């Protein structure tokens, strides 16, 4: 039986999903991509509202399946599978956080961008290296990156392919926190567990609104917020938290 390319562990209400092919720098081949999809599709956001993804060894993910490309096997089917992975991450009701250890190159950078949030080790490097082998950045990079950095910075990163370090990624808004390498996973899990205590319906509905923001007018956003808020008004979580706040003010 082939070795699994991923490992999963439960930490309270948070799942830690680790890419487990360190000898290949966790390169994103079809097998690993499908394993990630299968794991994420099994996650129920009502009971597990946050998923942390990271890599074993010295890389988060060093890019796509260049062996398949060299064999001439990377075509529309391969891209359909990779795009499905991005869609599952972006559309998942759970919050997906990347803990970027070491290299996040090519498709690995794409996974970071598709995630909702990202923490990075101080020695992390991120780069859109697709152009080095005559390819265009993919996995939603043209959608996600300009929304974070602005168009000018995005063009530079997409076209030049030069690595940026963790501090520059933080300055650009690609990652939210830089951690010591040996504290990256624990720091990310600590944040994830605090986030998991927030109202889960709020996280789910807000994530959906933000994903569609680039195609929405102000009226669309107001309508979407209104519908989401009506849904939140009716949740037990809202009623319980509101009662606790009112009780605290009365005491």
Image (tube, grey):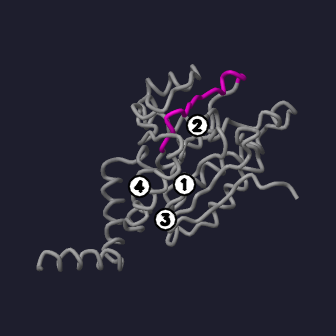
Camera-nearest residue between 28 and 211: 28
Task: State the residue position of label 4.
Answer: 209
Task: State the residue position of label 2.
Answer: 109
Indicate which label's residue lies in the foreground, 2 or 1: 1
Q: Does the stretch in magenta take in 122?
A: yes
Q: Which mark is residue 158?
A: none
State the CA–CA distance, disc 4 to disc 1: 21 Å
Camera-nearest residue between 119 and 213: 119
Above/below status of 152 relative to 87 = above
Marked residue nearer the N-terminal end (4 or 3): 3
State the CA–CA distance, disc 2 to disc 4: 23 Å
Please report contact status of discs 2 and 4: CB closer than 8 Å, yes or no: no
**Spot occupied by residue 69 in the image (x, y as percentages of width and height):** 81, 33
Task: State the residue position of label 3.
Answer: 49
**Spot occupied by residue 45 in the image (x, y as percentages of width and height):** 52, 67
State the CA–CA distance, disc 1 to disc 3: 10 Å
Indicate which label's residue lies in the foreground, 2 or 4: 2
Marked residue nearer the N-terminal end (2 or 4): 2
Marked residue nearer the N-terminal end (2 or 1): 1
Query: Residue visible at 35% across and 76% down?
Result: 237
Q: Secondary structure at mark 1?
A: strand
State the CA–CA distance, disc 2 to disc 1: 15 Å
| Range shown magenta | 119-134
The quadrant in which residue 168 appears is top left
Task: State the residue position of label 1.
Answer: 52
Marked residue nearer the N-terminal end (2 or 3): 3
Instruction: Give the quadrant of the N terminus.
Output: bottom right
């Amino acid at each position: 039986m082939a070795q699994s390319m991923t490992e999963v562990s439960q930490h309270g209400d948070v799942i830690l999903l680790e890419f487990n092919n360190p000898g290949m720098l966790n390169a994103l081949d079809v097998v690993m991509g499908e394993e990630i999809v299968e794991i994420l599709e099994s996650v129920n956001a009502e009971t597990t509202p946050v998923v942390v993804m990271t890599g074993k060894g010295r890389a988060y993910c060093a890019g796509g399946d260049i062996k398949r490309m060299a064999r001439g096997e990377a075509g529309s089917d391969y891209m359909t599978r990779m795009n499905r992975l991005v869609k599952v991450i972006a559309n998942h009701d759970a919050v997906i956080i990347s803990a970027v250890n070491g290299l996040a190159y090519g498709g690995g950078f794409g996974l970071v961008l598709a995630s909702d949030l990202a923490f990075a080790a101080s020695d992390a490097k991120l780069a859109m290296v697709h152009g080095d082998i005559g390819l265009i950045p993919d996995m939603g990079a043209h959608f996600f990156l300009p929304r974070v950095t602005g168009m000018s910075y995005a063009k530079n990163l997409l076209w030049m392919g030069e690595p940026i370090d963790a501090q520059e990624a933080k300055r650009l808004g690609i990652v939210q926190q830089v951690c010591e390498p040996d504290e990256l996973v624990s720091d990310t899990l600590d944040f994830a567990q605090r986030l998991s205590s927030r109202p889960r319906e709020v996280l789910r509905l807000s994530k959906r609104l933000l994903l569609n923001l680039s195609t929405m007018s102000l009226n669309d956003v107001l309508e979407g917020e209104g519908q989401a808020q009506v849904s939140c008004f009716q949740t037990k979580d809202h009623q319980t938290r509101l009662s606790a706040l009112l009780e605290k003010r009365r005491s």
